[in-house]
Amino acid sequence: MAQKQELVTRIAKRLDSVVSAREPDDDVAVAIENYTHDLTAASLERERSMLTAIEAALTRITVGEYGACKVCDVAIPRARLEAVPWAHLCVNCAERSTSQYS
């Protein structure tokens, strides 16, 4: 819950920084502003994705499915859940999922 609240706050702050009220006065300023905007947008997307994963984990806790792999239904090791509390796959299934996109 604490991580969820931290992300919500961070996303709100970053959304404010994406909106620019001034016009850059030269090409370099435009390029820097565009680059900064793109980095902020990518960071926001990653944080929104993490927030969605945290909310899904909280739902799994509520319905009693937390800690079980969504693919093979094997218990996710405690060490993995401590490292990534919103993990929904065991290490083996996560590795298989990642290798499919390589």
Image: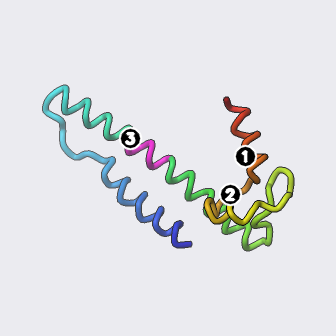
Q: Does residue 68 appear left or right of residue 47 in this picture? A: right
Q: Residues within 10 Å of mark 2 (few under 14, many from 20)?
A: many
The amino acid beneath tag 3 is Leu
* Mark positioned earlier in the residue sequence (1 or 3): 3
| Front disc: 1 or 3 | 1
Separation (CA) of disc 2 from disc 1: 9 Å
41 inside magenta stretch = yes
Q: Position of residue 3 (x, y in %)?
A: 52, 67
Q: Which mark is residue 94?
A: 1
Q: Which residue is mark 2?
A: 87
Q: How is the image coloured?
A: rainbow
Q: Does residue 48 appear left or right of residue 13 in this picture? A: right
* SS assignment at label 3: helix
* Residue nearest the observer in this picture, 29 or 72: 72
The answer to whether mark 2 and mark 1 are in CB contact below 8 A is yes
Q: Which residues are magenta?
A: 39-45
Q: Which residue is mark 3?
A: 39
Q: Position of residue 6 (x, y in %)?
A: 46, 66
36 inside magenta stretch = no
* Mark positioned earlier in the residue sequence (3 or 2): 3
* Mark positioned earlier in the residue sequence (2 or 1): 2
| Front disc: 3 or 2 | 2
